[in-house]
Image (tube, rainbow, N blue to C red):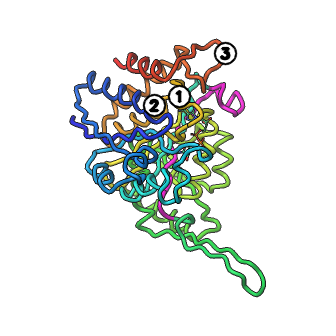
Amino acid sequence: MDMKIGVIKGDGIGPEIVDEAMKVLDRIAEVYGHSITYTRLLMGGESIDVNGVPLTDETLEQAKESDAVLMGSIGGDAKTSPWYRLEPSKRPEAGLLSLRKGLNLFANLRPAVLYTDLKEACPLREEIADKGFDMVIMRELTGGLYFGDRSTEVIDGVTVAKDELVYSDTEIRRIAKRGFDIAMKRRKKVTSVDKANVLDSSRLWRKVVEEVAEEYPDVTLEHMLVDNCAMQLVKDPTQFDVILTENMFGDILSDEASMVTGSIGMLASASLNETKFGLYEPSGGSAPDIAGQGIANPIATILSAAMMLRYSFDLDREAQAIEDAVGDVLKDGYRTADIMSGGMKQIGTKEMGERICAYIK
Ligand code: NAD
């Protein structure tokens, strides 16, 4: 297969971790006979330095012409970086928001995987952590409470603040379809999370999700109220495969799910639209505190590249090969500083990338 991949290395640790993910992709291409063309795209702080703005129209067009985009992370230290003396619309993060909007990325996918070899990092009780878990959270990203009308006004001497939570059936249907598509590539279970005992928007959510489920007879659908889901994530995370939910619930639950895995350096993510296109990036930021030291953990970015192969290119076997290689490297005791524990062998960013490549056979 010929793959056209846009690459945003970004700021801080971005270039270090993306270089390792590109090495792993090149190794996959070599072993499985694919060809990859990379197009370097500037976004965030590095684009401000070169172009004066965090995202140019040309870069957005180039991103649209790619099959998928792999990204490191953008941004700097808000206290010391000159980028943060610019007005908010010119800062690095504004580039990311414009990119997501310009590419119509309405679905955010965040896996939360606990490798049994990293279970010491898991804050849950031993008998829960021992079982490991592997779920993804599919969060709607462009609707709901964060995008509704809001106002604060004084009515009869009382200050009243209001935020509107709006969802249309079309918005729900398109994210639900993406959620079921993802489940078809996994253990074929969707847990749709809502607050249908209280909210109209959740009752519509549930109705539309049930309609979509009819198109996917192989997938088991269950509904769960968001408050129960928050409890179940720490009580028995093994029960989840795909959690499908709206914007605000997903915001909170995905952070909770990632916390129980223990390390930010392990967390991949993808933002998807209605096509096969996706933007793949680690969940963490640009970590200016450790940038340039060669100690950042590249695994989240490498696992994001695996997600790219699976979801944008349907290369499930190749994605699995990367995930297995990551598991094997951890099993053999290699750790970057952030996931280091007693008796393990500490290695840097480059060596972690190289070891993962070497385990891909
Ligand atoms: P951060 O995620 O960059 O760092 C938080 C902590 O996690 C730091 O101690 C850092 O060293 C550590 N960390 C993060 N990734 C790591 C990795 N791969 N390996 C080892 N340790 C890692 O969050 P922050 O400090 O709040 O933000 C720093 C900058 O990143 C800010 O400018 C912020 O706006 C930006 N940011 C960007 C994105 C993005 O590009 N999508 C996301 C979040 C934050």
State which quadrant residue 357 falls in: top left
Confirm or reject: label 2 Cβ below 8 Å from ligand 1.
yes
Q: Earlier in the sequence, mark 2 or mark 3?
A: 2
Q: Which residues are magenta?
A: 119-143
SS type, badge 2? helix
> What residue is at 69 percent from the left and 28 percent from the top?
127
Instruction: Specify the label residue 17 is tagged with.
Output: 2
Q: Residues within 10 Å of mark 2 (few under 14, many from 20)?
A: many
Which of the two residues, 89 or 302, is positioned nearer the viewer here?
89
Question: Residue 166: x, y in percent?
Answer: 52, 70
Instruction: Specify the label residue 217 is tagged with.
Output: none
The quarter of the image that holds ligand 1 is top right
Confirm or reject: label 1 Cβ below 8 Å from ligand 1.
yes
Question: Residue 255: x, y in percent?
Answer: 60, 46
* C-alpha separation, residue under disc 1 versus residue under disc 3: 19 Å
Q: Is residue 134 magenta?
A: yes
Question: Residue 178: x, y in percent?
Answer: 40, 52
Task: Please say if the residues under marks 1 and 2 sit with CB atoms less than 8 Å apart.
Answer: yes
Q: Is residue 214 magenta?
A: no
> What residue is at 41 percent from the left and 33 percent from the top?
18
Residue 236 as seen in the image, left or right of residue 73: right
Which of the two residues, 208 or 350, is positioned nearer the viewer here?
350
Instruction: Specify the label residue 342 is tagged with.
Output: 3
Q: Residues within 10 Å of mark 1 (few under 14, many from 20)?
A: many
* C-alpha separation, residue under disc 1 versus residue under disc 2: 7 Å
Instruction: Specify the label residue 296 is tagged with.
Output: 1
Task: Please say if the residues under marks 1 and 3 sit with CB atoms less than 8 Å apart.
Answer: no
> What residue is at 58 percent from the left and 24 percent from the top?
116
Q: Residues within 10 Å of mark 3 (few under 14, many from 20)?
A: few
Residue type at numbered disc 2: Ile
> What residue is at 64 percent from the left and 12 percent from the top?
343
Residue type at numbered disc 3: Gly
